[in-house]
Amino acid sequence: MSRSALSLGKSRNLHIMALDIQQFTSNSVASRKRVVMPENELEDLYRHYASTHTSNAVSEGSKRHEKWFPVTKYLPTDRSVNILDVGCGAGEFLEQLVSLEYKNLHGVDISPEQVEAAKLRLNGFATLACQDIFDFFTDNSMRWDLVVLEDVLEHFSVENAIRLVHLISDRLSTRGRIIIQVPNASSPFFGNYAYADLTHLSIYNARSIKQLAKLCNLEIVSINEVGIAPGGGMKRFIRRIAFGVTSRIIRFMIVTETGDRSDVVVSQNLIFIGQPVQSATKSSG
């Protein structure tokens, strides 16, 4: 066979291979598009969030689920501060703030079901908005002393999470702080929370939260483990010991592998507290 015929055959084979690859790529993209939840379905899921997700926990009678808010230990002592609860849901956290005698309370959530439930629960003790959070900040120019995102940031894509936290950073008062609770990817059991909701889009650990803070001009006040849920008597004592032992073993494994003792948070959730960089600079000067 001549060299030209070989070249022609090789060229034809390469062309066929290229077409096969192109077809495979097209099919892969198409299949990926099929498994991504359409935007209208995601909106519908949020519209009926209470009946498809949170009401399940309530119907199971889990008082611990309803009443335990780890972020409360990091609240300011001044009861007159302006507080915004982003993704306020049915108002359970705001209700606890009311019981703690905080006065200037605001909540925003995109789910009509949740906001209606919050209105019934709070009976006028907080100002509530049923709105997309970005629209909310466009329509509202208030400066906030505290913005809380408890189990909220993971509902946003990474791009929108950066956009949101940056926007909040710009709207904090000079003494303002942001508190974020998210599932912790460094926990070996993070999936218990991370995959407990179809609307979760992102996952974080202490390192990526630090990265987020830097991108959004936030000074890190602290990054904390959540610890164990409350409960009385001997059972809680045993759980506390078990959690302490387990946490030390997990930290030891991580440090043994990496040699790095920093950023080792192993609870299923973590809590980040930040403040505007200029505020931190002034307070330290």
Image (cartoon, rainbow, N blue to C red):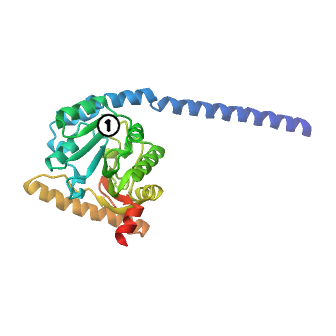
Q: Who's the residue at 28% across and 30% down the image?
A: 52
Q: Is residue 1 visible?
A: no
Q: Is residue 163 left or right of residue 250?
A: right
Q: Residue 27's spot in the image, x, y percent?
A: 59, 30
* Total tally of numbered discs in the picture: 1
| Quarter that holds the C terminus | bottom left
Q: Which residue is mark 1?
A: 109
Seen in the picture, residue 25 relative to 71 is either above or below; the reply is above
* 88 or 282, nearer to the observer: 282
Rendered residue at 35%/64% (across/down): 253
Name the residue rendered at 39%, 38% in the picture: 139
Q: Nearer the viewer, residue 184 or 209?
A: 209
Residue that extends furthest to the left in the rendered view of this protein: 233
Crowd band around label 1 with a 10 angstrom C-alpha radius: few (<14), some (14–19), many (20+): many
Considering every residue shown, the one lying at the far front of the view is 141
Residue 181, x across and y down, in percent: 31, 51
Instruction: Name above or below for residue 241 compared with residue 164.
Output: below
120 left or right, relative to 114: left
The image quadrant that residue 264 belongs to is bottom left
Percent across and percent down for residue 79 are 19, 54
Nearest the viewer among 212 and 28 is 212
